[in-house]
Image: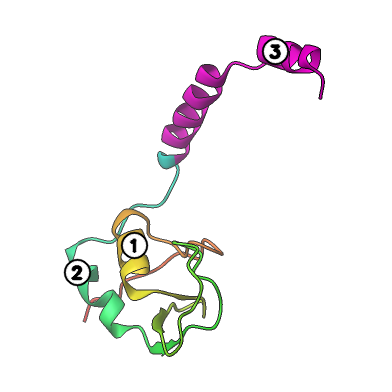
Amino acid sequence: MSSTTYDLFDECFDLDLALTMVDYFSSESSNTTSTPPDDDGSNLISDMPTVAIVDTCSVCMGGPETGEEGKRMPCNHVYHANCISTWLSRYNSCPLCRSSITIVKS
């Protein structure tokens, strides 16, 4: 690209505004997510089956290490145990398919 193209781009694009918009929209969308599980969900992770990880974890984007295990959600998606625990502490859904996680009280 020529320097005039860069100058035109600098005039049209405001990085500060773009970053502010991301904060605005992410806080707006957080109001529409389902509520995270309450304290009774602490056993939710331990109740999930432990399986071998074969795909990239959608939460941390980390690939599987040899022999690494993860937790299988009710929707059959698999994540690192720490990753899905952190996710479920904030959201009550699968990170990939947004399937709602219901906690059955015994």
Instruction: Name the element at disc 1.
Output: helix
Stretch of the chain drawn in magenta? 1-29
Q: Quadrant of residue 6?
A: top right
Identify the residue at horizontal 44%, vertical 30% (top origin). 23
Residue 7: give x, y in percent of width and height: 72, 11
Q: Do the residues labelled 2 and 3 touch (CB within 8 Å)?
A: no
Q: Quick one: quadrant of the C terminus? A: bottom left
Q: Label 3: which residue? A: 12
The residue type indicated by label 1 comes to Leu
Q: Label 2: which residue? A: 40
Identify the residue at horizontal 31%, vertical 69% (top origin). 82
Q: Nearer the viewer, residue 76 or 22?
A: 22
Instruction: Name the element at disc 3.
Output: helix
Q: Label 1: which residue? A: 88
Q: Distance between the residues labelled 3 and 1?
A: 39 Å
Q: Are marks 3 and 1 in contact (CB under 8 Å)?
A: no
Residue 75: give x, y in percent of width and height: 51, 76
**Which of pointers 2 and 1 indicates the residue nearer the eye?**
1
Left or right: 81 as drawn, with respect to 95: left
Left or right: 83 as drawn, with respect to 53: left
Q: Nearer the viewer, residue 75 or 62?
A: 62
Q: Quick one: quadrant of the N terminus? A: top right
The residue type indicated by label 3 comes to Cys
Q: Earlier in the sequence, mark 3 or mark 1?
A: 3
Q: Earlier in the sequence, mark 2 or mark 1?
A: 2
The residue type indicated by label 2 comes to Asp
Instruction: Name the element at disc 2.
Output: helix
Residue 65: give x, y in percent of width and height: 45, 81
